[in-house]
Image (spheres, helix red, strand yellow):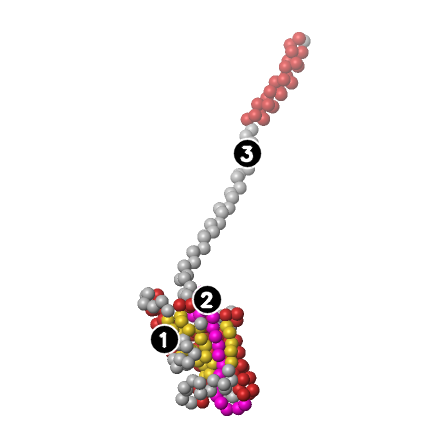
Amino acid sequence: MNLVKTIGRFLPVALSLAVLVACGDKKTEKPAPVKQPEPVKVEAPAPEPEQPAPFDFSKFAAIKNNSQVFLTTRGEVAAFLNDAFAKVEKGQASAIEFPNVSSLFELASAELSSEGRAIIAELAPKFAQTNMEATILVEGYTCDLGSVAYNDELSQRRAETVKAEIAKYVPASKITAKWYGKRMFKKFKYDTRDEYRRVNIRIQ
C-alpha cells in the first residue's frame, strides 16, 4: 500500500521531467535571413573640360570713321578674325584695328540680305564669347536719292534691322544704333551710290 502511494507521488514528477526533456530536445528552426539588395553604384559625372579664358575685345582699337577699310563678305570677316585672334594669342599684337564690317542694301530697302546675315553670324558669336568690355556701334547710311526725311527714316530702319540681328547673339544693351540718312553722302569716297546704301558695324 505504501509502495503504491509512493509511486503515485513520484509519477507526476517523472512525467513532467519527461515532457521537459522531450521539449528540450526539440530544435527551434530560425527563419532564413532575407538577402538585402546590393546598393546601386552611381558614377560621378565626368568633369567638364576647362573653357579658355574670354578674349578681351577691348584690345581692338576702333578704326577711324573715314577709314576706307571694310569687310563686306562672311569670308573676309572670318579670315580677319582668325588672323587677329592668332596674333593676340601668340603675343604678336596687343591692340588690333578692327575694320568696319558693312552690310549693303538694295535701293529703298531695309531688308537684310542673306550675305548680311552671314556676316553677322560670323562676327557676333565671336564677340559673344569674349568678356564684352567693348560695345558694338551700328551706323545706317543711304545714298542721295530722295528727301532728307525719307532717307533719315530709311537709314534708321536699316540700322535697327542690323541691331536686331546682332541682338540674337549679343545683349541689346551692348549695341548702339545710329543713323545719318544722306547727310554723309560724299563724305566717304565710295565709287558708286550702291556703296552708300550700307550699315557699318564697329567694335569700339
From the viewer's perspective, is 190 left or right of 36? left
- Image x and y of residue 139, in percent: 48, 79
**Marks 2 & 3, CB-CB < 8 Å contact:** no
Residue depicted at x 35% and y 65%? 89
Instruction: Name the kind of residue labelled 2 in the image.
Output: Glu
Of labels 1 and 3, earlier in sequence is 3
**Marks 1 & 3, CB-CB < 8 Å contact:** no
Question: Closer to us: mark 1 or mark 3?
Answer: 1
Instruction: Name the kind of residue labelled 1 in the image.
Output: Ala
Q: Relative to residue 141, is residue 58 depicted above or below?
A: above
From the viewer's perspective, is 131 left or right of 8? left
Range covered by the magenta-colored residues: 126-147
Look at the image and tell me in which quarter the C terminus lies.
bottom left
Question: Closer to us: mark 2 or mark 3?
Answer: 2
Distance CA(mark 1)–CA(mark 2): 23 Å
Residue depicted at x 40% and y 70%? 60
Residue depicted at x 49% and y 89%? 144
Q: Tell me if residue 168 can be seen.
A: no
- Judge by depth and name the residue closer to the eye, 63 or 28: 63
Instruction: Provide the residue designation for mark 2.
Output: 133
- Judge by depth and name the residue closer to the eye, 15 or 172: 172
- Judge by depth and name the residue closer to the eye, 171 or 8: 171
- Image x and y of residue 148, in percent: 54, 88
Of labels 2 and 3, earlier in sequence is 3
- Image x and y of residue 92, in percent: 32, 67
Distance CA(mark 2)–CA(mark 3): 80 Å
Classify mark 3: helix, strand or loop. loop
Instruction: Provide the residue designation for mark 1.
Output: 79
Instruction: Name the kind of residue labelled 3 in the image.
Output: Glu
Residue depicted at x 45% and y 89%? 193
Instruction: Provide the residue designation for mark 3.
Output: 29
